Amino acid sequence: MEIVVGAGSFIPLVWLIPALPLAAFLVNGLFGRRWLGHLTGAIASLAVGASAVMATGVLLEVLQLGERGRVVTLYEWFGVGDLHVPVAALVDPLSAVMLVVVTVVSFLVHVYSIGYMAHDRGFHRFFTWLPLFVVAMLILVLADNYVLMFVGWEGVGLCSYLLIGYWFERPDPANAAKKAFVMNRIGDWGFTVGMILTFMTFGSVRFLEVFEQAGHADETVLAIITLALFLGAAGKSAQLPLHSWLPDAMEGPTPVSALIHAATMVTAGVYLVARSTPLFAAADGALLVVGVVGAITALFAATIALVQFDIKRVMAYSTVSQLGYMFLALGVGAPVAAIFHLTTHAFFKALLFLGSGSVIHAAREQDMRRLGGLRRKLPITYWTMVIAGGALAGLPPLAGFWSKDEIVGAAFLNGYPILWGIGLLTGALTALYVTRAIWMTFHGEPRDHHLYEHAHESPPVMTVPLLLLAAGSVLLGFIGFPPEAGFLHSFLEPSVGVEGAAHHAPDYVAIAFLAAMSVAAAAVGIAIGLSTYARHRPDPAAVARATGPYYRLLVNKY
């Protein structure tokens, strides 16, 4: 359907949001090496920044109009028989929120990258591929059908290969890029099968047309479709058993890691399942599979993060774990909580990665066993990472507390006590490994005095994005307040809710009790971390001897 809007509306211009970074990609790719040089960073950043402004305008307009969903058709792409695929955007609360998250976080990563990559000889090449990454993710988010979404889906995969393997002269980045590409092809096969079966079942690949018929389809067929789509989501969002490519992706530049882990690529799988909620809800048992896989992945990755010494790998396994939380939320029937956590996670996880990059930039080292005492040298980096770490651990009133607590609480209130228990345990482990990482990096005496003496705070082009992300990590949680009934819930419900689903008034007594349990779990994890690393600095070899087979189990990733 076409829409009628007034003068000055952003919605008819929604395709400019990916078009602007696409223009930056073309300009930098054609002229960057010979004529533009370091201007490519400014061009890419300004383009993505303009997209962020437009995305914010779209969000505000959707808020004002309050409609369920509108389609903006650019042109008819192709038609074969009964299959008609337009280049069309579905503008609704879900896509509007995702547009803002992707563009705002991507803009801050672009600005940060100007400082981080300043001395890299491939600077222009980096700022050619980075805006293209954003373009692909924006197409994925805007698509009103599975075929166009798949174009963005594959574009994200291509760009991840190019950026993870950015330092392709080195064997490790090249191998990591190939691993990510191959493992994602497994998931992409599932997406393809699900897409084909969707057309065969419903005669369409357009979301609104498919979802209208979801309640009348055969449940067995729906189960096959949804499980195939979930395989695609598991590959892109690094869920068991397709998770191992994501930690290896740390071989790319740190801003790439931040972009992959926070606003692009790995969130694509969560978005796919959230967008397809009517299909999953109508398929008997599909959501339970999603929730169980998410819970197991969350716990598994949290245990692995406990024994990592590379600061970026700690954050990488943390991302796998937090994505597990999002799938847990989807599986227990709390899609709004999943998108809520996706939003808060985008800010505090981008901050943790960029903060880690600031440490690496300052000390030229990312092995935490050689760091220590850096809070005196990097005060801005330290305090912003403390905020992000607190948000990741789920400490109130930081953003991560509100979204993570809602997920864990939803598991209990919706009748999944085992998944609730796994969520609590994972929360305690999360608090433990983030406490360990921050203490080993910033506290105590320097372990390598040469590194310490040469360490320095990053320039403003890198620290300002850290401060802005820290502000988001503090404030964003309040968009979900009060729990289960806040602004975000009423806004997103039309996009991810299921017609005819029962709605109950929140039980704030139960919610308060469950929140207290979540905070208690985080407090236990922090207490164990501080008692272990603050009172004395354990030697890793001594820890390995003391814990014996358990340590080896985690080091070997089971």
Image (cartoon, rainbow, N blue to C red):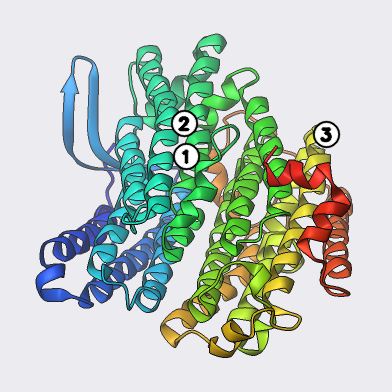
**How far apart are the alpha carbons under marks 3 and 1?**
26 Å
Amino acid found under the numbered disc labelled 3 = Ile
Residue depicted at x 75% and y 53%? 405
Classify residue 50 by image quadrant. Answer: bottom left
Amino acid found under the numbered disc labelled 1 = Lys
Disc 3 crowd, CA 10 A, few/some/many (<14, 14-19, 20+) = few
Could you tell whether 110 is left or right of 73 in the image?
right
> Which numbered disc covers residue 247?
none
Could you tell whether 389 is left or right of 462 in the image?
right
Amino acid found under the numbered disc labelled 2 = Gly
Q: How many marks?
A: 3
**How far apart are the alpha carbons under marks 2 and 1?**
6 Å
Image height check: is 35 above or below 187? below
Secondary structure found at label 3: helix
**How far apart are the alpha carbons under marks 3 and 2?**
26 Å
Image height check: is 191 above or below 485? above
State which mark lies toward you, 3 or 1.
1
Residue that numbered label 3 is attached to: 418
Residue depicted at x 70% and y 41%? 300
- The reply to whether dot 2 and dot 1 touch (C-beta < 8 Å) is yes
Secondary structure found at label 1: helix
Secondary structure found at label 2: helix
Q: Nearer the viewer, residue 492 or 449?
A: 449
Q: Position of residue 364 (x, y in %)?
A: 50, 75
Residue that numbered label 1 is attached to: 236
